Image: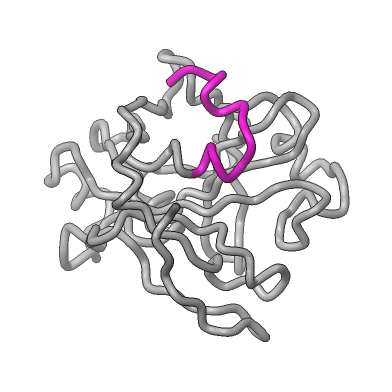
């Protein structure tokens, strides 16, 4: 996918990523996931963003070029992955929340043998990152480079009538912002869970 398509505001970049494919080379074989759910995070004006309080060694990738992986560890157990957007120097990223496997299912199940159904292989950000084998060593990888272990493959923009938006999952700060986007009807979309202090949000069609 062309980097310039991602060097855009986080909300437009998030919607543009829906329907695109993230492909990764793993010891079991190549795994590819079509993105069906994402969340946008901006910089200093987004209290839920890792970049809200400025640049640090941990979040530095968010301030760099668009089209790179920002991978972080959460709850002392899981990795989650984002793709950076906006221009170099402006912090922004889109969390990869859910996807549908579009590669060999046998390879995918070998990667995640506890998944009972195909829909569960990449439903949720930790599962998606685990399936693709993403870890701390992948932080900063350029997914627009065809030679990278992890690659972002473009696709035509999805039908706007299929895109839904609502509050982000599990965040208390800025919890009313409808910055989570997903494809209506996809089994790869994760269930909504509000963060502490957040109200339950309703899905809304995109206008």
Query: Residue 23 is drawn in which quadrant?
Result: top left
Q: Position of residue 29 (x, y in %)?
A: 24, 33
Q: Is residue 41 visible?
A: yes
Q: Please name the residue shown 26% across and 31% down the image.
A: 30
Q: Nearer the viewer, residue 198 or 206?
A: 206
Query: Residue 181 is drawn in which quadrant?
Result: bottom left
Query: Residue 82 is drawn in which quadrant?
Result: top right
Q: In the picture provided, is 86 more to the left or to the right than 205?
A: right
Q: Nearer the viewer, residue 10 or 89?
A: 10
Q: Position of residue 50 (x, y in %)?
A: 74, 53
Q: In the picture provided, is 73 more to the left or to the right than 27?
A: right
Q: Nearer the viewer, residue 126 or 12?
A: 12
Q: Position of residue 111 (x, y in %)?
A: 27, 49
Q: Please name the residue shown 38% across and 42% down the image.
A: 18
Magenta region, residue range: 1-14
Asked whether 35 falls inside the magenta stretch, the response is no
């Amino acid at each position: 996918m062309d980097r310039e398509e991602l060097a855009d505001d986080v909300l437009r970049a998030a919607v543009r990523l829906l329907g695109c494919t993230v492909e990764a080379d793993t010891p079991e074989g190549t795994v590819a996931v079509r993105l069906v759910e994402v969340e946008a995070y901006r910089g200093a004006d987004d209290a839920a963003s890792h970049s809200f309080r400025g640049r640090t060694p941990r979040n530095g990738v968010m301030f760099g070029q668009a089209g790179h992986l920002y991978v972080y560890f959460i709850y002392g157990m899981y990795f989650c992955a984002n793709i950076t957007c906006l221009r170099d120097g402006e912090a922004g990223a889109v969390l990869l929340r859910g996807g549908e496997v579009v590669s060999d299912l046998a390879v995918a199940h070998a990667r995640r043998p506890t998944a009972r159904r195909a829909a569960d292989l990449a439903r949720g950000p930790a599962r998606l990152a685990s399936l693709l084998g993403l870890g701390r060593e992948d932080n900063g990888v350029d997914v627009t480079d065809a030679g990278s272990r992890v690659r972002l493959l473009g696709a035509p923009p999805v039908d706007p009538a299929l895109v839904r938006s609502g509050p982000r999952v599990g965040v208390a700060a800025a919890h009313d912002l409808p910055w989570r986007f997903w494809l209506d009807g996809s089994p790869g979309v994760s269930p909504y869970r509000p963060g502490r202090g957040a109200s339950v949000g309703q899905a809304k069609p995109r206008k």
